[in-house]
Amino acid sequence: MILAADYPFLNILWSMIIFFAWVIWIWIMIIILGDVFRRRDISGWGKAAWIVFLIVLPFLGVLVYLIAQHDGMAQRSAEAAQGQKAQFDDYVRSVNASGGGGAAAEIDKAKQLLDSGAITPDEFAALKAKALA
């Protein structure tokens, strides 16, 4: 009797499935370890206990952590994403405020100086050329 495992393609397919499952499991471990170290609601001993549990009984530890802490993981991830977005928004605002809007803003300032008589038309042309360069 010929079994499906005797075919080379199915052996390769099975090996690929096992490999990707292994990669996914390692990724889940990385996510959980990152979440454990990010937590502020447990002590260092609690973090150490979770780490030991994940190392000694990895499959059971991952399942228990995901079942027991799924809401907290989602909340901490959302808070981290909001914090990163706020930090990025602050950075964009600071760059925009200090940058002044680029060449168009520099030309506008030079035009205002020309209109007020603070600079000559030649100086305006030089400033405009510098801004556009």
Image (cartoon, helix red, strand yellow):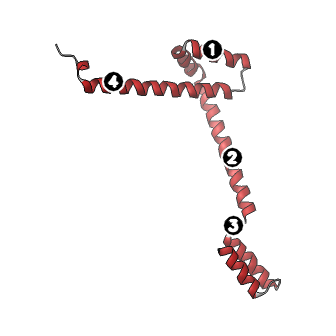
Tag in front: 3 or 1: 1
Q: Residue furthest right?
A: 118
Q: Amino acid at mark 2?
A: Ala
Q: Quadrant of residue 126?
A: bottom right
Residue 27 percent coordinates (x, y): 52, 28
Image location (x, y in percent) of residue 81: 63, 40
Q: CA distance from mark 4 to mark 3?
A: 57 Å
| Disc nearest the viewer among 2 and 4 | 4
Q: Is residue 13 visible?
A: yes
Which tag is nearer the camera, tag 3 or tag 2?
A: 3
Nearest-to-viewer mark from 2 and 1: 1
Report which residue position mark 3 lands on. Answer: 101
Label annotation for residue 86: 2
The residue lying furthest to the left in this view is 1
Q: CA distance from mark 3 to mark 1?
A: 53 Å
Give the residue at mark 1.
Answer: 52
Marks 1 and 4 sit apart, C-alpha to C-alpha, by 31 Å
Residue depicted at 18% across the width and 16% down the height: 2
CB contact under 8 Å: marks 2 and 1: no
